[in-house]
Image (cartoon, grey):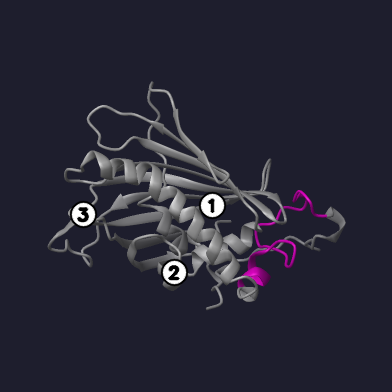
Amino acid sequence: MRARIAGGLTVFALIFGAGNASAAKWRLLYKKEGVTVTAKDRPNFALPVLRGVGVLPTNLYALLAIVDDVPRHKEWVYRLETSRLLSRPDPLHARAYLRFDFPWPTSDRDGIIDVVVTRKWAPHHEIKITFRRTVDRRMRPVDGVVRVPRTIGFTRLRWLSPNRTQVIYQIDTDPGGSLPKWLVGWISEDLPLRIVRGLRKQLIRRRGLYGKFMRVWDPRLTVQPDTPQQFILPGVDAKKLPRRSMVMTVPVKSAAPRSSK
């Protein structure tokens, strides 16, 4: 089953994503504060494909609760001006509008993205969020704001232990318009690290405030509609995990949680 955290996770879409692999090799940009950022250059594109890998000292579902809380994204996402959920037809899909405040004298960027979320139990317990740029008649272009013409990617959250989550993200995006070299460097290097820092601070500020979300989605606390009969969560005693006494048939839409606000 795909978890109902698609809307919240769209905040990564203009920053992190996954692009088409090419013959070019990944080059290391930096390793800072536990985050490794690499890049793959592409001809005729201002920005390279970016990949970031890091480990956050938090439970996977505590992290999901933070990113599901869309109205609070401005508290931790650097230069995010607007994050608006446009539609969520079911727990598996969402559409959102994002606008970022770019440094003067460049224009702000905005975009509309479709998001699909999947959950996997083996060989690793993880959440994968894929997204791509789309169009929506409800959100017409804004004067003075450049609409991002292309974004495609994914973010993957992998359970390492009850208090450690690996985050893997990639981006292949064309921000549109012309960008000075200093701004390309800012997007490639400064912005990803700032967002990770903000997320870490938000995890501390909102710690313990998403009990409802955790009770609904944490497989240590409740049986999940998509839970297999046998599964492993590293760092958790398998005998203490809730198990289904019989096969459950729960419609996906009825399993959609709402994060505590």
Q: Is residue 225 magenta?
A: yes
Badge 1 element: strand
Q: Which residues are magenta?
A: 213-236
Mark 3–mark 1 Cα distance, whole angstroms, equals 28 Å
Give the residue at x 17% y 45%: 177
Specify the farthest residue to the top.
23
**Which percent across, then down, holds residue 147?**
21, 54
Q: Nearer the viewer, mark 3 or mark 2?
A: 2
> As rendered, which of 94 and 31 lies closer to the eye?
31
Give the residue at x 83% y 54%: 238
Mark 3 packing: few (<14 Cα in 10 Å), some, or many (20+)? many
Q: Which residue is the site of mark 2?
A: 75
Badge 2 element: helix
Residue type, mark 1 in image: Thr
Placement of the N terminus among the 4 image quadrants = bottom right
Q: Which residue is the site of mark 3?
A: 147
Find out whether the residues at labels 3 and 1 contact each other: C-beta distance under 8 Å. Answer: no
The answer to whether residue 4 is seen in the rendering is no
Mark 1 packing: few (<14 Cα in 10 Å), some, or many (20+)? some
